[in-house]
Amino acid sequence: MAQRRERKLPVQQLTILAICRFAEPIAGTSLFPYLPEMIKSFGVAENEVGKWAGLAAATFSLCQACAGVPWGRFSDVYGRKVAILLGMTSTMVTSLMWGFSVNLPMAIVARALAGIGNGNVGIIRTTVAEMVPFKELQPRAFSLMPLVWNIGSIFGPMIGGALANPFNVEPGRQFEHPSLFQRFPYALPNLVCACFFAIGITTGVLFLHETLESKRDKRDYGRILGSKLVYLVKSFIRRMPCLSISNDSETEPLLNPDRESGLPKPPQKPRPSIREVLHRQSVLNLTTYALFAMHTMTFDQLLPVHMQYPSIHSGSPDVTLPGRNPLKFAGGYSLDHFTIGMLSTAYGMFGMLVQFFVFPGVARRYGVLNCLKVVAWVNPIAYALMPFTALLPTQRTQVIGAFAVMLVKCFCGIFGFPCSTILLTNSAPSLQLLGTLNGLATSAAAIGRAVGPALGGGMFSLGVKHGYLILPWWILTAIALLQIYPVSLLEEGEGFGDDDDLMDEEDDEQNDEAGNPPRKMSIPIGMGTQGISRRLSCNLGQSLGSAASYNEQ
């Protein structure tokens, strides 16, 4: 009699991957609170800040778009781990370059190099897919990296808002003997981010496993060193009477060093071509993902610029008061970078709670495709309402109204990105194509993130000039409406897990009686003469204790 082996998430490796990932959202979101102020410190006029902030974001995303596919192909050849570590190192260096920028061209170059040097968005997604190929585990696994992003989004704006310009240096002010942070007022938050990168890189080198099939058996000297360090720490703890662990006979390192396998290696498969990846459903998923990234990034870039812009109640000559035309007005919230940072932190905390407590259950109950369809309709409504919060009678009510819209947008983002990622992953014909597919997704999303902020920033400056601040927000609404069509054509893909992961109950009992550990089951990736086994149907919530069935569309 056989029973199904319970599938479990590789918690240890996902945790290590999350630690590696953690620094990137901190660095990426820490600049939003002070970005408008930093742009102004380079001598840019108030009504041009939105345009240049958008161009800075667009430069990063455009360069990321150019590098996405090469990074994906690089990871397919040389491995996921080395690509992730190189991307993190590059981002750490360019973050420091950004913080020490003394003029606008230097800042733009820093953002360009940051985009070229990191393809980790797609590579990490591929790594998660290779760690967790079973469809019923995907909602939990694929929600982890967005959860990490949301946690980083709590600390990033807090770091940027609290540490940027600590001496309140005004643009053009000269010091006889300036200190480091008077000369470089925006360096401190980026130095803190570099410390997080150092922790992530060290953790990855020592403990992260390679998931690319052709590189799994290659000796990893970083992991060998990590295993020895873990063993030394555990040995030291055992020698401390007050810290002695209960099982003194356990001497096996936590992470075993890689060993060259004595088994014959399977023949190398030819690398897939781009044409194999691009079928109807993958193109629809790529389009959906690109549009979603486009309007989401545009919102994130517009929001701090809008919040920093003078309020209609401030008496500033840069505002346009509402008149007979209810659509003609131009005013923000008059918030400083510290307040913007605190609001962004609260925004990230809300997102973390939704990601952890709400998303997995709702995705199991209703399915990722249905969740994505709802998100596609709610997003444009939130964008259309956003500019009108600036018309509320007091600054407090303005901020409350804007934050309410932000929470709706946050809810949509928390559901939209993991759902889109799961659908995109399951649209791949095989796991062998995932690196290339996610490289294409990174490039497509980066193009959206380049076009969106550039368009939004330019429209913000144009709208302010003519007194129509609704212009960038309603263009953003139109972009979100475009996403509804490809979402309506999406279909559920199959998974990559194998149904034949059964264990013999008698073998388990014999192993237990003999004191041997249960037999390890290998994940069916690229094994067998028939290629990759695929699940024809599955219960999305099976392993998470849900009794609700998931019906494939």
Image (cartoon, helix red, strand yellow):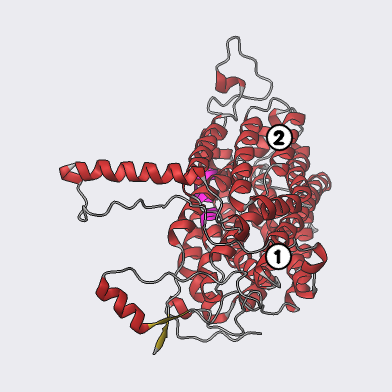
Q: Position of residue 417 (x, y in %)?
A: 63, 64
In magenta segment, residue 392? no
- Local secondary structure at mark 1: helix
Give residue 546's mark. Answer: none
Q: Is residue 26 left or right of residue 113?
A: left
Q: Amino acid at mark 2?
A: Ala
Q: Is residue 452 above or below residue 538?
A: above
**Badge 2, how many Cα within 10 Å: few under 14, some, many 20+?**
many
Start and end of the magenta stretch? 148-157
Relative placement, left or right, of 489 versus 130 is right
Where, by quadrant of the figure, is residue 436 drawn?
Answer: bottom right
Count of numbered labels shown in the rendering: 2
Q: Which residue is mark 1?
A: 433
Q: Residue at x 70, y 47 (%)?
A: 331
Left or right side of 141 for 238 = left
- Residue 57 visible in the displayed image: yes
Task: Examine the rendered structure and indicate whether residue 107 appears above or below residue 156.
Answer: above
For residue 87, above or below residue 527: above
Residue placed under numbered mark 2 in the picture: 110
